[in-house]
Image: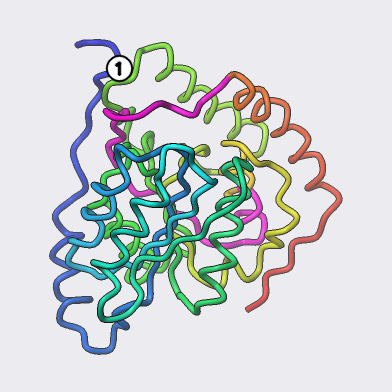
Amino acid sequence: MNSGHLFAAPVSGRWFKTLFFLVLRNPKAPVNNAIVIIPTYNEKENIALIIEAIMDLPKQFDLLIVDDNSPDGTAEIVKGLQKTYNTSGTRLHLLERQGKQGLGTAYIAGFHYALDKGYEFILEMDADFSHDPKDLLALYLECIEWGADVSIGSRYATGVNVVNWPMGRVLLSYFASSYVRLITGMPIRDTTAGFVCYRRKVLETIPLDQIKFVGYAFQIEMKFITWKFGFRLREVPIIFTERLRGQSKLSPGIFKEAFFGVIQMTVRSWFKRYLLRR
């Protein structure tokens, strides 16, 4: 086996059978009740392809691109595609920000936007196809059909499901999640996952503007606070594939933030009360 080529079975076909009966043949299911948020910075090689892939899914997802003033013209590509996809209503949204401000703040801005627009299910994913757009269906169904408040596309729920990562990076990611579980007590195997579906009530309950982290540790903090509030988190097995186009945004500072920040986050939680609004 080549290092980094670690596979598991793909998402079960039950998702797609259930999707057909639940969504496509259920007249009570709102057409535009879900939106996918994708933060971008210099993703011109991926953005048109990922938008097309999401728009072609059998379940209609609206899409919000949060672009941090990408110098490669990512936002201009999105504006061009809006002419194609917004002919009978706004499905493709664009939120432009002034400069690179961090992954966490991009998602927070996207969450506020989605809540203001009235969406019931708010999903997040990367632009680089490391997350398979087809798995959006599985995350959505885990919430709308099987009762999860938050569903997480997990690389580690059924082993190590990663393709094209060097073995060193696989081990770093896997043991980072193990470290987070040990420190926080969260029953989540993929604590840094960035492929997530939230019910609206979760994001209305969490004090979004008090989230501390701005890098990839943001994903840990969101799961931790959601768990502390008593919401139901469930992991959905996915296969994660390393990007083929563009450059990774990972840096040593990201891992430093996560390592030390998890301890601080956990200690702070000892002095807080988490009251779930029903």
Q: Label 1: which residue?
A: 4
Q: What residue do we see at 61% from left, 56% from top?
A: 108
Question: In the rendered image of this protein, does residue 190 appear above or below residue 50?
Answer: above
Residue 33 in the image, given as x and y percentages of width and height: 38, 76
Q: Residue 222, percent across and down? A: 60, 50
Rendering quarter of residue 29: bottom left
- Depth check: give the residue in front, 149 or 54: 54
Q: Give the range drawn in magenta.
A: 224-251
Spot occupied by residue 183 in the image (x, y as percentages of width and height): 67, 32
Q: In which quarter of the image is the C terminus?
A: bottom right
Residue at left offset 23%, top offset 66%: 84
- In magenta stretch: residue 68: no
Q: Above or below — where is 58 with respect to 182?
A: below
Secondary structure, mark 1, is: loop
Q: Which colour scheme is used?
A: rainbow
> How busy is the neighbourhood of tag 1: few (under 14 within 10 Å), some, or many (20 plus)?
many
- Going by the picture, which residue comes out furthest to the right? 271
Above or below, 177 against 61 in this view is: above
All told, the count of numbered labels is 1
Q: Position of residue 276 (x, y in %)?
A: 68, 70
